[in-house]
Amino acid sequence: MTLKTVNKADYFIEAKKSITFWSFGDEVGIRLIPRGEKQTEMQFSAGTVWGWGDFGHEGRMVTDVFNRIKNVSESAAASEAK
């Protein structure tokens, strides 16, 4: 994936994966909203760049990105606790 937009002031990231022979291409948008100490809301959008349907791909991509962010957050919290 290639980052298209990174706006640190608004906590917004937008990325795109180009269309290939094996993929329709993907677009991902993530906005993080601080809600308090150690609390953050995440607004996530994902979709294919082109195609007739995602055949479950979009759902898998959302779950994968969410789990990666969760794992990084939890490992950072564990490091702070030490």
Image: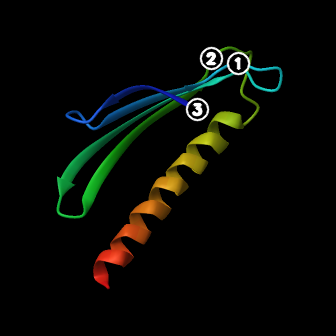
50 lies left or right of 33: right
Q: Quadrant of the N terminus?
A: top right
Q: In which quarter of the image is residue 11?
A: top left
Q: Name the residue under label 3.
A: 1
User: Which residue occupies 68% across, 14% down?
Assistant: 50
29 lies left or right of 50: left
Check disc 2 and give the amino acid type: Val
Q: How far apart are marks 3 and 2 (CA)?
A: 13 Å
Q: Name the residue under label 1.
A: 19
Q: Which SS class for mark 2?
A: loop
Front of the two marks 2 and 1: 1
Proximity of marks 2 and 1: CB atoms separated by less than 8 Å = yes
Q: Quadrant of the C terminus?
A: bottom left
Q: Where is residue 37 in the image (x, y as percent from the top left)?
A: 17, 63
Q: In this view, does 64 lie above or below 25?
A: below
Q: Where is residue 33 in the image (x, y as percent from the top left)?
A: 25, 44
Check disc 1 and give the amino acid type: Ile
Q: In this view, does 64 lie above or below 44?
A: below
Mark 2, Cα crowd under 10 Å, few <14 / some 14-19 / many 20+, is some
Which badge, 2 or 1, is on the more N-terminal residue?
A: 1
